[in-house]
Image (cartoon, rainbow, N blue to C red):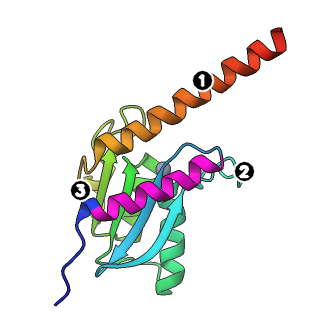
Amino acid sequence: MTTQRSDEEWMMQALMLADKAWQQGEIPVGAILVKDDEVLGEGWNQSITLHDPSAHAEMMAIRAAGKALKNYRLVDCTLYVTLEPCSMCAGLLVHSRVKRVVYGASDAKTGSAGSIMNLLQEPKLNHQVEITRGVLAEACGEKLSAFFRERRQQIKAAKQATQG
Ligand SMILES: [Zn+2]
């Protein structure tokens, strides 16, 4: 029997996908969809690159997984994402029938897995998603902070350049 990979190991992989977003100048969020220890879909935030406000990491991973499975239901799958899903992605996760969501950093502004609301476990909806919170939360949060720090510095440098 093979040993199952841990939540932390999968989150490390999601963090590497977040780096791809960063390389494209996107807010670094990465997601990976897993079933039976197998990767079905990977995604990273690409909203700016694709001119698509729905191109969040979770959305990209789920679209890829649906195509891989040739199914619009992602039963018994787990989604790993570095940042707490927003309401759009939480809605998508309910529609896709994902079994469990594991996230890293919480999002106090848009997080819809408990922070501003808990759409993933809304009892009035026909599907509830298990949630595991805070896996590698510090690493996930620090990546976002570092990105915004860098961006602020770039803006500042650009301003100084035009003033000089
Ligand atoms: Zn989202």
Vertical position of residue 130 compared to residue 82: above or below: below
Residue at the image point whose x is 57% and y is 30% from the top: 150
Q: Say which quadrant the C terminus sits in.
A: top right
- CA separation in Å, label 2 and label 3: 30 Å
- Name which residue type carries label 3: Ile
Residue 124: x %, y % from top left: 27, 55
Apparent side of residue 122 relative to residue 19 in the rendered image (left or right): left
Residue matched to label 3: 131
Q: Quadrant of residue 99?
A: bottom left
Vertical position of residue 128 compared to residue 48: above or below: below
Q: Which mark is residue 51?
A: 2
Residue 119: x %, y % from top left: 33, 50
Residue 45: x %, y % from top left: 56, 52
Q: Are marks 2 and 1 in contact (CB under 8 Å)?
A: no
Residue at the image point whose x is 57% and y is 55% from the top: 20
Using the image as rendered, state which of residue 96 and residue 15 is in the foreground.
15
Apparent side of residue 55 relative to residue 121 in the rendered image (left or right): right
Residue 92 appears anywhere in the view: no
Q: First in sequence: mark 1 or mark 3? A: 3
Main secondary structure found in the magenta portion: helix
Vertical position of residue 13 compared to residue 75: above or below: above
Please, what secondary structure does the residue beneath circle 1 have? helix
Residue matched to label 1: 152
Residue at the image point whose x is 39% and y is 51% from the top: 82
Using the image as rendered, state which of residue 63 and residue 146 is in the foreground.
146
**Residue positioned most to the bottom:** 1
The question of residue 86 being in magenta is answered with no
Residue range in magenta is: 9-24
Q: First in sequence: mark 2 or mark 1? A: 2
Q: Say which quadrant the N terminus sits in.
A: bottom left
Apparent side of residue 125 relative to residue 74 in the rendered image (left or right): left
